[in-house]
């Protein structure tokens, strides 16, 4: 996709995985991209993956920290002008059953995945409002916002929170013509990262996907760019799953009668 020339895009949690894919897609489409991540080493690694270093800035940020997020947006304004797009992507996925979970583990997930999204969106929205920018905000949620998973109570709760936050923010920003939507990935393959699941769980997950495979980072990025394109002007407050049909409730049952 092209057509983002001259636009300033901020992506949080971009040093690996989905965020890096989104950042790259915007950059390829002509945007200036500010990449923010809590891991300085990973930011350096991300920087090395870009052939063209023009229109890029890398800013260390902890999205749980209000002043750090304000600094990220200020750096973006300084580097490339007021942001037109914010992608609130940073998130963590630790696993623990409720019986075994430390309170600190619960807090870490909620603070990163929910407070972090709130702070990122608030800072970007304030900048867009102040500059009269008809901007676009996309949060990265998950189909875990409504499909539960054993050991992921904090994660699922945080993503359900992200979705409701997205909807209400869309209502509040509509009068300023700032669109707010969420992209909800299903199971996405991250080539540069060691698998976070064992083989048995991975195989069971594939069985739950009508498309019969994991998604690709580029497929998530395409959905995000589409929501930020001029054609999506009238789309706000919605959630777009990118999940190969996992959201349909498919349980891999056979047809109930012989005719297909
Ligand atoms: N990979 C999937 O299958 C999948 C599925 C559904 C939703 N998601 C969501 O997509 C987003 C990206 O996931 P991913 O798979 O690319 O994960 P990832 O771990 O590869 O990337 C997440 C990035 O966020 C950064 N981060 C973590 N805490 C941070 C903080 N406090 N401040 C700033 N940055 C921080 C990490 O350093 C990392 O670079 C997450 O919100 C995740 O919940 C992923």
Image (cartoon, rainbow, N blue to C red):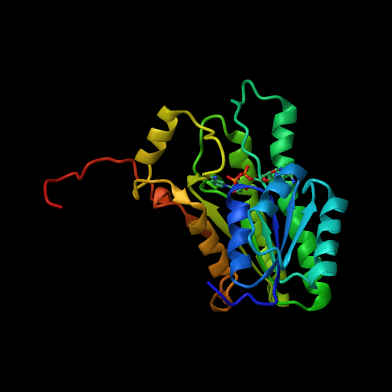
Residue plotted at (74% across, 35% down): 107
- Kindly indicate the quadrant of the structure image that contains residue 50: bottom right
Is 254 left or right of 55, judged from the image as shown?
A: left
Q: Quadrant of ligand 1?
A: top right
Residue 170 or residue 198, whichever sits in front:
198
Residue plotted at (73% across, 36% down): 108
Is residue 140 something that shows in the picture? no
Q: x, y percentage for residue 135?
A: 70, 72
Looking at this rendering, what residue extends furthest in the top direction?
Answer: 100
Residue plotted at (57% across, 34% down): 152
Is 69 left or right of 48, judged from the image as shown?
A: right
Q: x, y percentage for residue 246?
A: 41, 48
Q: How many marks?
A: 0
Q: x, y percentage for residue 105?
A: 70, 30
Is 153 left or right of 249, judged from the image as shown?
A: right
- Kindly indicate the quadrant of the structure image that contains residue 10: bottom right
Is residue 91 something that shows in the picture? yes
Q: x, y percentage for residue 217?
A: 52, 53
């Amino acid at each position: 996709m092209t057509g983002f020339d001259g636009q300033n895009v901020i992506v949080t949690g971009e040093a690996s995985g989905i965020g890096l894919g989104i950042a790259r897609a915007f950059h390829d489409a002509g945007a200036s991209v500010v990449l923010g991540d809590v891991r300085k080493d990973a930011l350096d690694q991300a920087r090395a993956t870009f052939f063209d270093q023009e229109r890029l800035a890398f800013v260390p940020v902890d999205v749980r920290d209000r002043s750090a997020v304000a600094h990220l947006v200020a750096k973006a304004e300084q580097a490339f002008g007021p942001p037109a797009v914010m992608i609130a992507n940073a998130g963590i996925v630790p696993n623990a059953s409720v019986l075994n979970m430390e309170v600190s583990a619960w807090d870490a997930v909620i603070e990163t995945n929910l407070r972090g999204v709130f702070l990122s969106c608030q800072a970007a929205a304030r900048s867009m409002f102040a500059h009269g920018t008809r901007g676009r905000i996309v949060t990265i949620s998950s189909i875990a916002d409504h499909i539960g998973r054993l050991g992921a109570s904090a994660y699922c709760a945080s993503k359900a929170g992200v979705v409701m936050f997205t909807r209400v923010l869309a209502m509040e920003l509509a009068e300023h013509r700032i669109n707010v939507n969420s992209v909800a990935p299903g199971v996405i393959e991250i080539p540069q990262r060691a698998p976070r699941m064992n083989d048995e769980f991975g195989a069971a997950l594939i069985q739950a996907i009508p498309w019969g495979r994991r998604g690709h980072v580029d497929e998530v990025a395409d959905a995000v760019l589409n929501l930020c394109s001029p054609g999506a002007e009238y789309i706000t407050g919605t959630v777009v799953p990118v999940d190969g049909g996992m959201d349909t409730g498919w349980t891999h049952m056979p047809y109930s009668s012989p005719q297909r």
